[in-house]
Image: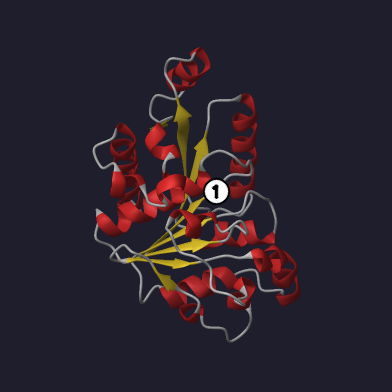
Amino acid sequence: MASIAVYSVKGGVGKTTLAVNLAWCAASISRRKTLLWDLDAANGSGFLLGVDPKKKRSADSVFADGSDPAKLIQTTDYAGLDLLPADESIRALDRQLDRLGKKKRLAKLVEGLAKDYDRIIFDCPPVLNELSAQVIRAADLIIVPLPPSPLSARAFEVVVEEVRGSGKGHPPILPVLSMIDLRRTLHREAREANPTWPVIPLASAVEQCAVERKPVGAFAPRSPAARAITQLWTAIERKLAQK
């Protein structure tokens, strides 16, 4: 089993869309039993997968002592892909983790889920707190989507500093240029400066994910965006194989 965090301290970078599409690739292309774990209170992953949250469900209860995450997991319309959704109550998780005083609570829960899943993908909240620190401890790889802008570059530096600060055994980081439009000078310069980074184009198919409430590969499999996401997933699998 391998766990992958899609993480950024800056919102609006395509984090949730990327997490959903990578989870779909894991299940539909690699045929791996996959869990998408939504840790963002906006519940964007559930929305994009067409999964409506259950009423009166507390997302933070999964972190309590003796809890069973499997009871909160929901199936999706895609074979091999399950969702552990978020809701508003997850906003209190940081305080709850502080009260528990367990620095590896998330990693322990991941260990329990490993018997049922080949891949666990985290859609992380765009914050720096105890929850993000626990995600870093639990992840085998961290994906950082980066639109070409100075603010994104600064945000990436913050993520790198945070990950490296977690200790010598920190997970590798894979930056991904997202929302790229090579007709724009700034975007071309970003691509030229980082020629080895994977690229996700600025494309209508990606934007349509929120309209269709489906991953790109499910409704536009031959689109440039779907091909780019598939190539990224191949690069991720290759990187995991090197561990």
Q: Residue furthest front?
A: 211
Side (left or right) of 166 relative to 92: left
User: In the image, what residue type sits under mark 1?
Assistant: Tyr
What count of labels does the image hold? 1
Residue 73 location in percent, x, y? 46, 74
Position of the C terminus, as image quadrant, is: bottom left
> Looking at the image, can residue 51 be seen?
yes
Is residue 22 depicted above or below 110 in this figure? above
Residue under label 1, please give it: 7
Which residue is situated farthest in the bottom direction here?
66
Task: Describe residue 81's horizontal placement relative to residue 42 as left or right.
Answer: left
Check disc 1: other Cα within 10 Å, few if <14, some if 14-19, many if 20+: many
Residue 57, percent from left and from top: 59, 76
Vertical placement of residue 99 versus 17, above or below: below
Q: Residue at x 59, y 37 (%)?
A: 156
Task: Give the residue drawn at x 58%, y 75%.
Answer: 55
Give the left or right position of residue 50, taking residue 157 as reference: left
- For the view shown, which residue lies furthest in the top direction? 185
Residue located at (68% from left, 51% from top): 128
Q: Pick the quarter of the image with the N terminus.
A: bottom left
- Foreground of the two, 120 or 61: 61
Picture quadrant of residue 105: bottom right
